[in-house]
Image (spheres, rainbow, N blue to C red):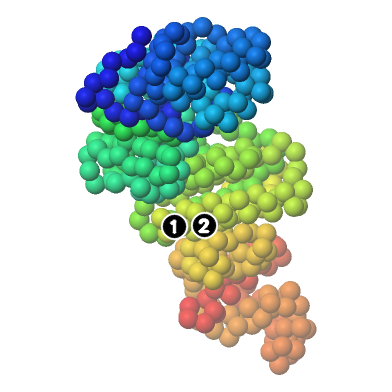
Amino acid sequence: MVTPRRADSVTLDLASVLAHPDNGELAHVAGPEGGSWQEVTVDEHTAAGSGLLILSSPLPATTWQQDALVRRVHDRGFRALALPGASAAAPGAQKLAARLGVSLLAVARPYELARACWQLQQARDALTIDYVRKVAQAFEYPATDLADLLGHLCAAIGHGIALIDGRGAVQQSGGTLSQELHGAIEFSPWISVARYADEAAASVRVDSSTREGLRLVVFGTGIGDAQLRALSTVAEIMMPAVAARILIDELATVNDASASADLLRAFLELRGARDADVQTRMSERGWRTAGFHLGFQFSPRTRVDPIGLLRAVSHELASISVESRAALSGRSVLGWLSFSEAPSASQVETYVGALHAAHQHLRRTRDLALGIGSLQSGEGGLARSLSEATDAAKIATSRSSTGYLVRVDSLGLEQLLLAWTGNDTFLPAAESLLAPLLTEAPELLDTLAAYLDHESGIQATADALGLHRNTVSQRVQRAQELVGADLTSPETRLALHLACRAVLAPGS
């Protein structure tokens, strides 16, 4: 039987047939990997023809019969042969097919291949209806989230599906949308088609009330014009379900982000103390506090959407091959990397480098600072590393010289604390603490600062200021009384030292 040839039939190419999701498991075996034809024949006994010959009988077992079949198909004018078992063709038969220019194809279900060819060549409406039917069946399966929905749709239509924005793929299933093909997609039209090399895509604008600039894309290689037109219609049909799923996931994300932020705040407020309820909630979320941790904080330097920032940071963390957690902390994203065993110094540097790379990538679209804490162990260590990351991020917001990135380990504790004293929170507190000296006895402030600079050494301070040691001793005692501080306490001396540095710094 020869498939009727109509006046409006189109040229059929091998690439588009291979790209058809219901091609009977067609696979190229030997001969030309390209080629096109206008006739498709399903007949074992036709005397002559052209184009593609589909046989329902399997490939002969003996090599001479295989060679004879390939030669007979060529002599009758066919340029391609598809039949069951062709993948087992002997090397000689494969070489003969290549030499004669016959594409040898293996197909598990010949009549399904014939139907696919008919759809592509003469029944484009039937092809569209077939895709739509499969999409309708996919909607019958409940999806847990957007990724699950895209997976169902991808499996149904047999092509890659992606949700994209102007920067690239937001989520995808069934393949990877290349940057070149993404660049060829027009974002203005409601529906658009694009091609790059052997890749093709049909896309539709996503009508979403929560996220703008999105498109739903169906893509793949070898897709012919008939398929592309059908897939444009299918993409338009799938879009409302995708938009609804985005809204559902967005609400779930907001609720989850709020709960995570509350839990992280409760954990940090404990300052290393244990609380059974907080521990239970952290365990339920999979937040492991045992092991070793490296805290980090991404802080916006300008106005941003916190949920969008959290989503973007989480996306970047997914590419780092270690357990990671992140949650909102005010407008910032605070998180940590966790290790079951202590990482080596070189491994720590590798992960710090990965966070740096994530920061660089995020800064292409957002003005962010990044603070990184030190490696700490256990529950108390996690709290310390997160606190360090928060302080480092505060400093990083004004450190253009370091690319708005500050790492505690690279600063050293004293440098970190001294840098922190310049912020808007510490300076007023320092001025309030030292107010009695600033207003009543400025010379006592200078003496106290020198005393603390010289590690509480009376003689060293006297030598530096050109004073008698008794004078220094009396002034320090008087300053201590006015401020109401106990200089025998290391913590008090550190606080006073930082306060003196802050208020005596140039420009303060």
Vertical position of residue 491 compared to residue 198: above or below: below
Q: Which residue is mark 2?
A: 360
Q: Position of residue 349 (x, y in %)?
A: 69, 54
Q: Residue at x 57, y 11 (%)?
A: 59
Amino acid type, mark 2: Gln
Residue in front for this viewpoint, 9 or 291: 9
Q: Residue at x 68, y 51 (%)?
A: 350
Amino acid type, mark 1: Arg
Q: Residue at x 58, y 55 (%)?
A: 356
Q: Which residue is mark 1?
A: 364
Q: Which corner quadrant holds the N terminus?
A: top left
Question: Label 2 crowding class (10 Å Cα cut-off): few <14, some 14-19, many 20+?
Answer: some
Confirm or deny contact between disc 2 and disc 1 (CB under 8 A).
Answer: yes
Which label is found at residue 241?
none
Q: Position of residue 235 (x, y in %)?
A: 30, 29
Q: Secondary structure at mark 2?
A: helix
Residue in front for this viewpoint, 118 or 240: 118
Q: Position of residue 406 (x, y in %)?
A: 58, 61
Viewer can see residue 170: no
Residue 78, quarter of picture: top left
Q: Secondary structure at mark 1?
A: loop
Viewer can see residue 187: yes
215 horizontally vs 483: left or right: left
119 horizontally vs 502: left or right: left
> Real-space Cα distance between discs 2 and 1?
7 Å
Residue 441, quarter of picture: bottom right
Q: How many marks?
A: 2
Q: Residue at x 63, y 78 (%)?
A: 449
